[in-house]
């Protein structure tokens, strides 16, 4: 897939390799912005195909049109302890608001999806090449879609029950069941994925047409080739 829109993936690379590769792609003018956060495996991921391994949620904004299979291939990392290389899952289209709220395991956001997690994360744990740009993006997040769940969480913090919430917020009869599930998710300290699987870390080889991304593919960023400042934060 070719795109110039924001993309994201889940990486099972070593952190030093991941950070170095993101910086390399930024310096080459391929990425304009990147950020990642390390997640520990949730209890339901231990012992399954996810293998109970830590992983990184990675967000990227291309500086130009990129081929996602080539971006994925760039994260292929030799693993001395394994015949198969480390790498990342499919690189897919993304948007910052959803990525950030999920990256923190924001309980209001997860409840809006009918989900909950055992672990939550702090904004300070996000690693990025441009913290000022990160702060700017965070300030522009539209929380309108999760406002009902923010209000719901406030009722819970105030010690009120679900009936008080329904009456106070004038929830329609048809919507009560959905809101009741969200109420339960907000109160949960366990992992609930609403039918979605955990993260698999079985790294498959990139699609046949994919190859390692090279700076030579972008001659305008070679010495003497044009504006070297483009995409650099």
Image: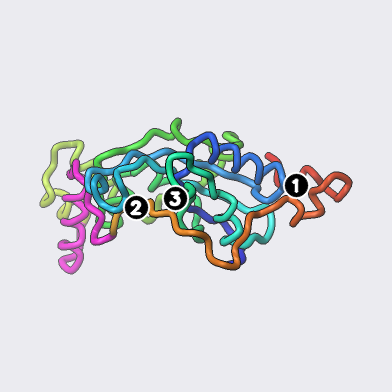
Residue 22 vs residue 110: left or right? right
Q: Tell me the CA gap for discs 3 and 1.
A: 26 Å
Q: Is residue 152 visible?
A: no
The mark that comes first in sequence, 3 or 1, is 3
Of the 4 image quadrants, the one containing the N terminus is bottom right
Q: Closer to the observer: label 1 or label 2?
A: 2
Q: Which residue is mark 2?
A: 199
Hey, which residue is sitting farthest right in the picture?
224
175, 91: nearer the viewer: 91
Mark 1 is surrounded, within 10 Å at the Cα level, by few (under 14), some (14 to 19) or many (20 or more) other residues, namely some
Residue 121 vs residue 163: left or right? right
- Asked which secondary structure carries label 2, the reply is loop
Residue 182 vs residue 132: left or right? left
Q: Which residues are magenta?
A: 170-196
Of the 4 image quadrants, the one containing the C terminus is top right
Which label was assigned to residue 10?
3
Q: Position of residue 108 (x, y in %)?
A: 30, 47
- Asked which secondary structure carries label 3, the reply is strand
Residue 140 sits inside the magenta stretch: no
Q: Is residue 65 visible?
A: yes
In percent of the image, x 27 and y 46: which residue is there? 151
Q: How is the image coloured?
A: rainbow
The mark that comes first in sequence, 2 or 3, is 3
Q: Position of residue 99 (x, y in %)?
A: 44, 50
Residue contact at pointers 2 and 3, CB within 8 angstroms: yes
Q: Which residue is mark 1?
A: 230
The mark that comes first in sequence, 1 or 2, is 2
Residue 202, compared with residue 104, is above or below; it is: below
Residue 186 sits inside the magenta stretch: yes
The image quadrant that residue 195 belongs to is bottom left
């Amino acid at each position: 897939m070719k795109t110039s829109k924001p993309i994201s993936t889940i990486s099972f690379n070593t952190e030093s390799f991941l950070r170095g590769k993101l910086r390399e792609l930024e310096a080459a003018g391929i990425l304009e912005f990147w950020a990642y956060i390390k997640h520990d495996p949730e209890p339901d991921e231990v012992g399954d195909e996810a293998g109970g391994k830590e992983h990184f949620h990675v967000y990227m904004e291309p500086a130009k049109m990129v081929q996602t299979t080539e971006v994925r291939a760039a994260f292929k990392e030799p693993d001395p302890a394994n015949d198969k290389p480390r790498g990342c899952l499919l690189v897919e289209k993304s948007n910052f608001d959803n990525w950030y709220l999920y990256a923190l395991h924001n309980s209001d956001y997860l409840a809006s999806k009918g989900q909950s997690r055992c672990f939550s994360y702090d904004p300070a744990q996000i690693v990025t090449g441009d913290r000022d740009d990160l702060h700017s993006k965070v300030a522009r997040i539209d929380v309108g879609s999760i406002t009902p769940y923010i209000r719901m969480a406030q009722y819970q913090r105030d010690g009120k029950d679900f009936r008080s919430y329904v009456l106070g917020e004038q929830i329609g009869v048809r919507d009560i069941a959905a809101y009741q599930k969200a109420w339960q998710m907000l109160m949960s300290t366990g992992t609930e994925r609403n039918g979605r699987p955990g993260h698999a870390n079985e790294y498959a080889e990139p699609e046949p047409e994919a190859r390692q991304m090279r700076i030579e593919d972008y001659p305008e960023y070679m010495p003497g080739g044009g504006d070297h400042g483009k995409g650099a934060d």
